Structure formats: structure tokens, C-alpha cells
Image: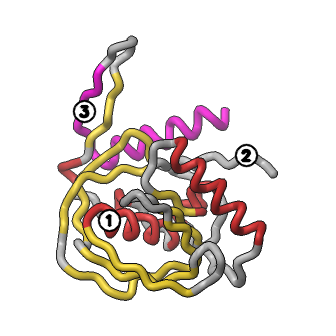
Amino acid sequence: MSELHIVKYPDPVLRKKAAPVERVTPELQEFMRRMADLMYASSGVGLAAPQVGVSLRIIVVDADDRLQMLVNPRIIERDGSQTGVEGCLSLPDLHGDVTCAERVVVNALDSRGKKVTLRGEGLWARAMQHEIDHLDGTLFIDHVIPDSLFWVVREPGEDGGVSERPTSLEDALRQFERQAALLKA
């Protein structure tokens, strides 16, 4: 089984609507475990299958100290509003403010193929919305408040700090496209 890696923008799989999963198999369960391992290794709170190059409706989320591995998740209720900083493992080091629902209810299959209905708020609700958006080819940059975008810049050196550098969406996307072109060259 090949090692999973995070697909970066502008890879076309990130903009494609993911296919529903017909049945939860032992192979799919192993795939979800590997997704969760990669999410944790990358210091993420969520990961969608398209982010590892697999266009299936699968997400893993751990935003409240419990791992949720979900198949064919759907948001069936939204309530309230929250605005906060988001980032994405497929758009590394880019962050910005996004407004989304404060509370959501999600229907899905769990990692054993059992139907579940989950309710959550705050960071959990934000993460669910972010990851389910990935399944429809939607990225956080599609919802970001434009003037809030910034790069997280890590200073070199052992005790290097972290700073923020404002950017525009256009400049950020050009930067990702340049990096992708360099990787192909």
C-alpha cells in the first residue's frame, strides 16, 4: 500500500466533486486510519479524501479530542454564526477569517458502516463544514474574508518565531501555482 501524502493547491482533485462510497470495506477502514495518521502527523484537525488524491466522500476530523471517521457525511442542519481563522493542509501556511455556522448536525456512516447523526458546535462545527466542503470541491479560500488573508512565516533558526504577512487572494494563488510549476519542472 503506497504512502499517503497531502495534495496541494492547484491540484485539480481539490476542485472535483467527490464520489459517494457504496460500502464500507476493511480496505476503506484501513484507508481512513491512514488518513487519520497523516492528519495527526501534519498537525491538522481534519482531512478529506480529496486532499490525499482520492475523490471519495470520506473525512476524518478530531476537533474535540475524539476522532470521527465519516463516510458520505452531509450537513442536515446549520444554526448560528461564527467567524474565525481557518487554514488548510492543502494550502499550507495561508490563513484567513471565514464565517460559518456555529452549530451543525451531520448525517453519515461511521467507520463500521453504521448510520450516525452527530451534533457539534464551535471548532468541531467549523472543521466539519471545512472538510465536507472539500468533498464538493470547495476550499476555505472560496469563503474567506478577502482582507483577512495572511501567510504564517516561520523565522529561520532554532528559536525562530512566527510572524504574519498579509496577502491578497490573487497573490497567494499565484504563489501556489508557481510552487506547483517548480515541482513539475
Q: Which residues are magenta?
A: 161-185
Magenta span: predominant SS is helix
Decide: is 100 above or below 46: below
Residue sticking out furthest to the front: 65
Residue 98 disc label: none
Q: Earlier in the sequence, mark 3 or mark 2?
A: 2
Q: Residues within 10 Å of mark 2 (few under 14, many from 20)?
A: few
Q: Tag 2, which secondary structure?
A: loop
Query: Label 1: which residue?
Result: 126
Give me the residue at 44% from left, 67% from top: 138
Give me the residue at 35% from left, 25% from top: 154
Q: Tag 3, which secondary structure?
A: strand
Query: What amino acid type should be assigned to the residue bearing mark 1?
Result: Arg
Residue 54 vs residue 65: left or right? right
Query: Label 2: which residue?
Result: 3
Residue 5 vs residue 42: left or right? right
* Circle 3/circle 2 CB separation < 8 Å: no
For the residue pair 119 and 132, the one nearer the viewer reads as 119
Query: What amino acid type should be assigned to the residue bearing mark 2?
Result: Glu
Could you tell me residue 167's position as x and y percent?
A: 26, 40
Query: Label 3: which residue?
Result: 165
Decide: is 67 above or below 171: below
Mark 3 vs mark 2, foreground winner is 2
Mark 3 and mark 1: span between their CA atoms? 24 Å
Mark 3 and mark 2: span between their CA atoms? 33 Å
Query: What amino acid type should be assigned to the residue bearing mark 3?
Result: Arg
Could you tell me residue 133's position as x and y percent?
A: 43, 70
Give me the residue at 59% from left, 48% from top: 38
